[in-house]
Image (cartoon, rainbow, N blue to C red):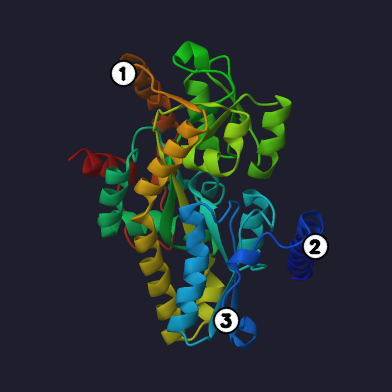
Amino acid sequence: MRIRTVSSLLLVLTVAVSMLAFSGLAGASALDKWKPDFDPSGAKYKCIVSNVSTPALVGTHAGFEMRDELWKRTNGQIYIDFKPLSILGGEVEVLNMLQMGAIQGMGVSSVASTNLGPRFGIVNLPFLVDSFEKLDKFISNEKLFNHFLNAMDHQGITGLDITGYGNYGWATTEPVKSIEDAKKIKFRTAEAAVNQLSYRNWGFNPVSMPWPDVQVALKQGVITGLDHTPAVCNLTKKFEVAKYFTQINYAQGLFIWIFNKAWLASLPDDLRQTFIETVHDVCAANREKTAAWEEDNIEAAKAAGVEFFQLPEAQMEILKDQSKDTYEKYAGEINKLYPGDTYKPDNFLKEVQDFLSE
């Protein structure tokens, strides 16, 4: 018990130090323009929620939308203190804070989510949930989608819903028009085993790196390419260095909105139900904006001189074929069942594959 208490205190200290460091480096808060138009000091319940990205991303801005909508629906009883921009650190360390209860929620990227919920890796598998249409279809299947969201239940964490940030491809410092071109690139990938294995199976050179380190690494040539979505690359200034983008659209970029299970359970029944409904409603409305938002950012990047490419269809088929090993490697982890699962499929991965191919 003493060890657990000390660990919790250290995590809380880490949060405080991170926030102070951010304040000192940034001067005036980078979040001033997103301040609430209400005084949150009277809230009975406070929920600190983290995200690594900028609120300029439509899927990240959902955190502020949840804050404002929940305040209205609970008449000021619950305040979501949303902290984007990696204020609390990288995703792996923040996941640990969430599990320990030092914070209450997180909009975790799908690529990092597998560190505590391997089942979440199903959406990172190449060319499975690889379009806005397939994502909508997956979400529409309540049985499959709820099983997906339950991926971290055994870790004391509840998944409630998702928002998006576009289609994954390659931002690079030199043109990539073929697989051979791609083999010359040092690609940054998230700290996620599924993505790293995919890149190795494709014969590429993946470099695992926390998101806050990417900008400097790209400028210094430590990496020469970036595995991400065009809108994120545009809004976070990656296109200032990497002026080429290859649209392979192999997966959807997602934020999974996860919360500490014990904290949720501590809320009165009516407020807990309102909290859950608010997250669902905000995420559903937010997702409707993503496709148009991505296209707007692609057009803005093109206007700024970024060149966009697509691989020949024959080479796309090669990548899809080489991705089979990734499926085989992670099928067991994705299909693993835990005591808290209410749905117990024999083969969750195959059920999703079959459903999306109908």
- The reply to whether dot 3 and dot 1 touch (C-beta < 8 Å) is no
User: Foreground mark, 3 or 1?
Assistant: 3
Type of amino acid under label 3: Phe
Disc 1 element: helix
Q: Does residue 271 appear in the picture of this structure? A: yes
**Which residue appears farthest toward the front when viewing the image?**
303
Type of amino acid under label 1: Glu
| x and y percentages locating residue 38 in the rendered image | 57, 81
Disc 3 element: loop
**Which residue appears farthest toward the top when viewing the image?**
180
- The reply to whether dot 1 and dot 2 touch (C-beta < 8 Å) is no
Disc 2 element: helix
**Which residue appears farthest toward the left when viewing the image?**
358
Left or right: 237 as drawn, with respect to 277: right
* Label 2 CA crowd tier, 10 Å (few <14, some 14–19, many 20+): some
Left or right: 51 as drawn, with respect to 23: left
Residue at 42% from the left image edge and 37% from the top image edge = 299
Question: What is the C-alpha distance between the residues marked 3 and 1?
Answer: 53 Å
Q: Does residue 229 appear in the picture of this structure? A: no
- Where the N terminus falls, by quadrant? bottom right
| x and y percentages locating residue 249 in the rendered image | 39, 33
Pointer 1 residue: 313
Kindly identify which numbered label has been placed on residue 165: none
Pointer 3 residue: 38
- Where the C terminus falls, by quadrant? top left
Relative to 73, does residue 350 appear above or below in the rendering? above
Residue at 48% from the left image edge and 88% from the top image edge = 75
Pointer 2 residue: 20
| Dot placed on the residue nearer the N-terminal end, 3 or 1 | 3
* Label 1 CA crowd tier, 10 Å (few <14, some 14–19, many 20+): few
Question: What is the C-alpha distance between the residues marked 1 and 2?
Answer: 50 Å
Q: Nearer the viewer, residue 169 or 259?
A: 169
